Amino acid sequence: MTTKSRIHLSVPHMSGLEQQYINEAFTSNWIAPLGPNVDAFEQEIAEYVGTKGALALSSGTAAIHLAVKLLDLKPGDKVFCSTLTFAASANPIIYEGGEPVFIDSEPESWNMSPQALAKALEQAQSEGWLPKAAIIVDLYGQSADMDPLLELLDHYQVPMIEDAAEALGATYKGKACGSFGQFGILSFNGNKIITTSGGGMLLSDDLEALAKARFWSTQARDKARHYQHSEIGYNYRLSNVLAGIGRGQFRVLEERVEQRRKVFERYYAALKDIKGVNFMPEAPFGRCNRWLTTLTIDPNLNPVTPNDLLDALEAENIEGRPIWKPLHLQPVFQKYKYFAHGSAADSQNSPWAATNGSVADYIFNTGICLPSGSNMTTEEQDRVIDVLLKVLKK
Ligand SMILES: *Cc1c(COP(=O)(O)O)cnc(C)c1O
């Protein structure tokens, strides 16, 4: 066992500005949910992302839930969803009795494959149905390839929810992640690039829809002196104190993106020439916020497995993680349909030949996430790099 201090995957990184906004909330006695910090935080984020409005909520998951409700998801309806993501991307489909259909990644960005989406849409239409919505994730802080994805969705008139929980500060062709769908969602959970300790945001140009979501998120109280309810509501609003933390965090967002990108660059410089090691590529269409630095090891070129690396890191008190386990492989989602990027036949000479054309399976089998916090010291990064070099070069 080592006595070295723990290096975590991604921890909150305060700017020092948060306290000022929290103090304002206390001195003006706006401790209750709602208040000036909430309004200002919504305005600041909407302006930054470039949507007409924003709704601050208690989590990113709550934002996805309200987005699928706004798209009128009913029991039995199907929703397409990226497979390579956290379960929270798809759980709200189930909350409403819907059925997820999972779509594979493409190798260029690790995000939803236009090729797999096209197959799924064609097959759905040939069977006489279409999905109610498509939830497209911007994985590990990188935008999906929005133009071809949106072209397909527009053709079939399927609305998009952009799950940009990991991608605040990232762009696609110069435009901010979170702004591409009919609805966009962000997360301010403790491990994300900026945090309110827990929180999320629903983004949209549709102010009427946001007003409806605001109504649902505050217990669906009708306009009346007494408590009257004509619809089922939720307690999903972000508190004014937490919004204060968010405002202090938001002021240093650009700095945090630069810091995470630097963490990536140091790992990349140290490890890029090792046989079989491939970092998540930064697709030419956007700027990645490098929320987490992730890499795969091609088993045909290097015998070291993700578990070998994670074990070696753990022995040095360093937290690494596997890549998100694809949702179509999760016990709770296994029964739902899945569309892979390639087929067994057309993938024969590719790295995903062994997974029958599924790129997400290949990335999961061969990949890991490295500690990537914006507050990591260079000494901490060197500790990680030393462990990786030792194992990978053996
Ligand atoms: C974190 C995350 C969520 C959920 O956000 P919470 O604020 O934790 O509810 C959803 N989707 C993705 C891709 C995430 O990484």
Image (cartoon, rainbow, N blue to C red):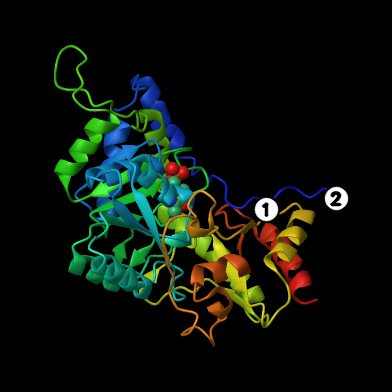
Question: Tag 2: Cα neighbours inside 10 Å, few (<14), some, or many (≥20)?
Answer: few
Question: Tag 1: Cα neighbours inside 10 Å, few (<14), some, or many (≥20)?
Answer: some
- Residue at 37% x, 29% y is 239
Q: Which residue is mark 1?
A: 319
Q: Position of residue 380 (x, y in %)?
A: 69, 57
Amino acid at dot 1: Glu
- Residue at 49% x, 56% y is 327
Nearer to the camera, 309 or 68: 68
Give the alpha-carbon distance from disc 2 to disc 1, as whole Å. Answer: 14 Å
The mark that comes first in sequence, 2 or 1, is 2
Q: Tag 2, which secondary structure? A: loop
- Residue at 65% x, 82% y is 273
Q: Which residue is mark 2?
A: 1
Q: Tag 1, which secondary structure? A: loop
Q: Position of residue 1 (x, y in %)?
A: 85, 50
The furthest residue to the bottom: 349
Q: Position of residue 365 (x, y in %)?
A: 61, 67
Amino acid at dot 2: Met
User: Can the viewer see residue 169 in this picture?
Assistant: no
The furthest residue to the front: 127
Confirm if mark 1 falls within 8 A of ligand 1.
no
Q: Quadrant of the C terminus?
A: bottom right
Nearer to the camera, 256 or 393: 393
- Judged left or right of residue 263, residue 112 is left
